[in-house]
Image (cartoon, coloured by chain):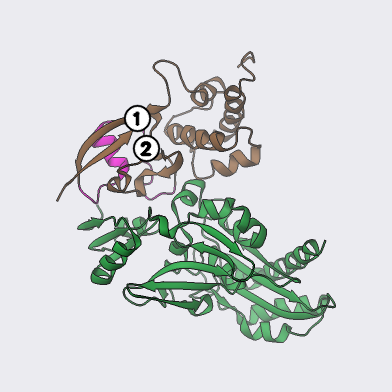
Chain colours: A green, B brown
Amino acid sequence: MHSEPIEYEKPASLREFESIYAAKAEDAKILSGGTDLHVLIKEKLLAPRLLIDISDLPELRGISYDPVRGVTIMAGTKIAEIERSPLVKEHAPALAFAAANLGSNQVRWMATMAGNICHASPAAETPPVLLAHDCELLIARQGGERTLPISRFFLSYRKTALETGEYVKAFRLPPLPARAAVSYRFKGLRKAMEIDMLNIGAYLELGEDGTSVNEVRLAMGSVGPVTYRAVVTEQKLKGMRIGEEFFAAACDGVVQEATPIDDVRASAQYRNRVIGVLTRRALEECLHRIGERRG
Amino acid sequence: MKKLIKLEINGENFDVAISPAAYLIDVIRETVGLSGTKKGCGVGDCGACTVLIDGRPTLSCITLAVACAGKAITTIEGLSRGSELHPVQRAFIDKGAVQCGFCTPGMVLSSKALLDENPHPSQDEIKTALAGNLCRCTGYAKIIEAVEHAGRLLSGEGCDEQA
């Protein structure tokens, strides 16, 4: 059987959690939803000496919106709550869509978005959308907090920028400008409980004329050791006009910047072909959403 | 070191002495002795171990029992009232949605959670809600029919319908 964690602690408040974690972070794992953590423990890929259960801390739950700060999602909010949230559906529909396509209904009622990003799998569902939104992470530890753009969070395969004793406390999605939208597209083998063979989050922001491109963000998953943005392509696309040339440049660009490998889910060759298609669809969906927003 | 905790299962309190590393599925089946909940893959993929925790469908094979203290756990044994089956159970029988039966407890509980939230789900909504419950007899068509039927039974419609 699996290696048994020796201890389990369930702090009753955030303050208590921070003090336990400050003292024992080296040997501990934070238990939130457990849908990845317990599988890693059962498969003997991890053997923590202590699990600190934060799943019921009220301070870490909830979704709020403010016109200046945008959408704030506390780290312990369940994926199923994000999927159903009217605020998320209104201000970040691509995130609601990605949440609805994560795991299964049971997994979504257990798992959290903080768990999804801290697991730091390049195939995870929410990172491409969060990168497309240029999400800001609130990272905390006992006695302090800092913010970090999510673009600097994923360091390498299953390695994040969290320092010992730090945890992800909240996600902030800045408000979208009037002519901007985010979309998410993915490719998997079946509809549920699959690991994406490819996914992409796209952000498109148009100028006042409605045809010139102010800014693009393209965040690709499952084409490298981490989910990352095609920053060279994003720069090239800036200032172009919406049209065939723009879409072709976006598709060519992501294929240039993608570094997929062959694995059990798909070949590198397949991924290189399909990432361009997903990019085009994602950008078209952004355009459609911008049109809808402007009525 | 074992921990003494109180688990509320189907409205009844059980005092159990368990290892903090014990998973809920094993405590329900082995310690408490309710064997209706099934253990399939053991890593959260198949949904056979689904129970409801505070009404939400949860994978008991990747949930620590110790984490469930103070929560209301519902297993398949908790649905019927005496000899009177829950409408979802009735519907699974009426529609022939049970073949080998191994996935059935999880299917029934996932269906109940869906119908509690959405009394008249579309076929697509049913498929989405049950996507984490695998049936290797591939009896999905009958299962989906049963969930639709259960929705009607729960809202008091279709009582006279021939099964």
Q: Position of residue B86 (x, y in %)?
A: 48, 23
Q: Nearer the viewer, residue A182 or B25?
A: A182
Residue A27 position (above or below residue A87): below
Residue A82 occupies quadrant: bottom right
Q: Position of residue B59 (x, y in %)?
A: 40, 45
Q: Are marks 2 and 1 in contact (CB under 8 Å)?
A: yes
Q: Does the magenta segment cover residue A193?
A: no
Q: Report crowding for label 1: few under 14, some 14 to 19, many 20 or more residues within 10 A (C-alpha).
A: few
Type of the residue with mark 2: Ala
Q: Nearer the viewer, residue A85 or A14?
A: A14
Q: Give the secondary structure at mark 1.
A: loop
Residue B11 numbered mark, or none: 1
Residue B72 numbered mark, or none: 2
Q: Specify the subunit that label 1 lies on.
A: B
Residue found farthest to the left: B1
Q: Does the magenta segment cover residue B37?
A: yes
Q: Report the number of numbered marks.
A: 2
Numbered range of the magenta stretch:
B19-45
Q: Is residue A225 visible?
A: yes
Q: Specify the subunit that label 2 lies on.
A: B
Q: Give the secondary structure at mark 2.
A: strand
Task: Give the left or right position of residue A163, taking residue A50 as reference.
Answer: right
What type of secondary structure mainly makes up the magenta span? loop
Quadrant where the image shows the C terminus of chain A: bottom right
